[in-house]
Every structure is written in structure tokens, then in C-alpha cells.
Image: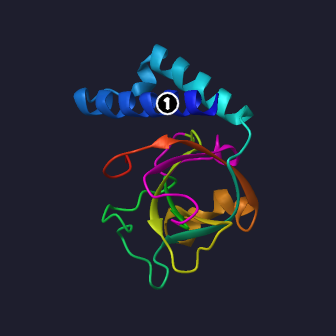
Amino acid sequence: MKRFLGCLATLALAFSASAASAAPASLDNDPIGALIGQAITSALQQAAPDFLLKATLYHAGEPGMSARDSLGCKVVAMRTAAVDGRRVPRHTVLFIKQTVGLPMPGGGVSDGFWYASDLGSAIHAGRIDLFTGQGAASMVPLLSLNLATLSVVDAGTFAGCPPR
């Protein structure tokens, strides 16, 4: 069942990325796409977690923080996750149910999808770092998640850089 949900999530993300690049209109105006997204999110929220990971938040402007992840892609607020590559492979799409509905920078709410595109020397086994955006103020909506253990579902894989 998880493999099926992961395939659905990957297809929905691929569809939304290709639709977004093909047409400048927002997918918010696509009721069928929204319905599919809601169904996938609902199913993933009820799935048993693949990982229980202790979260640490980080933001642009911290000492040693790079504007690029370990894939060479720009870090994306509320999307880029740094992981222990031995436990969670890079290029994994992660669904973190505790982040669903949190405010996104620039408006909208999080769908709970994050992208394992970064590695960190201090990230070992049961940890995950979540990139919140520009400056310490970007961490405020997620402060309740800092140092909390999060339920993380492997929702598939992505190629290239995470979507913006």
C-alpha cells in the first residue's frame, strides 16, 4: 500500500511540476488536481511512518549555512530537508504530516511534502534538518517542531532539484 501511495504522490508531484511549467496559471485553479492532492495527502497522513526523526530547524543567515544543498540546488523554504544519507537517501520525497497546513513563505499552506536534497555533518541516524527560509523569523511558525520527533513517510523519489 505504501509503495502504491508513494507512486501516486510521485505522479501527482510530477504532474503538478509539468503543469506548472506548461501554464503560468496556478494549480489552485485546478479542482481535479486539488482533489487528487487532497486524496494523496489524506492517505499519507494515515500511513504508518517509515521513519521517526528528531527535527532541527535551520534558516538562511545562520553561520555556515549555504544557499545551495549538497545536490548543488538552491535550498527551498519549507521544502528542503537535510538527512543522514545512510538512512534516508537523497532524492527521496518525504511526507511529514506535522507540517501539513503550516504557513508557507509568500502565502499558502504546506502540503507536508519535503525533499531530501541536503546532507549535514551533524545529522546522524534519527535526525532531520528542515529549512524554514530567510532569517530567524522564518522559524516562528515551525517552532513547535524544533527538537520534536516527527512521523516521516517515504513518498517516492525525485530527479534533479526539488520543485520551488
Which residue is disc 1 drawn over? Answer: 7
**Residue 67 part of the magenta-drawn span:** no
At x 76% / y 62%, what residue is drawn?
A: 148
Horizontal and vertical percent position of residue 147: 73, 68
**Residue 88 part of the magenta-drawn span:** yes
Amino acid type at circle 1 is Cys
Using the image as rendered, state which of residue 59 and residue 91 is in the foreground: 91
Horizontal and vertical percent position of residue 45: 70, 35
At x 63% / y 33%, what residue is drawn?
A: 2
At x 45% / y 58%, what residue is drawn?
A: 90
In this picture, residue 95 sits left or right of residue 21? right
Q: For mark 1, does the 10 Å Cα neighbourhood hold few (<14), some (14 to 19), or many (20 or more) residues?
A: some
Which stretch appears magenta?
85-108
Q: Dot 1: what SS?
A: helix
* Quarter occupied by residue 42: top right
At x 64% / y 41%, what residue is drawn?
A: 100
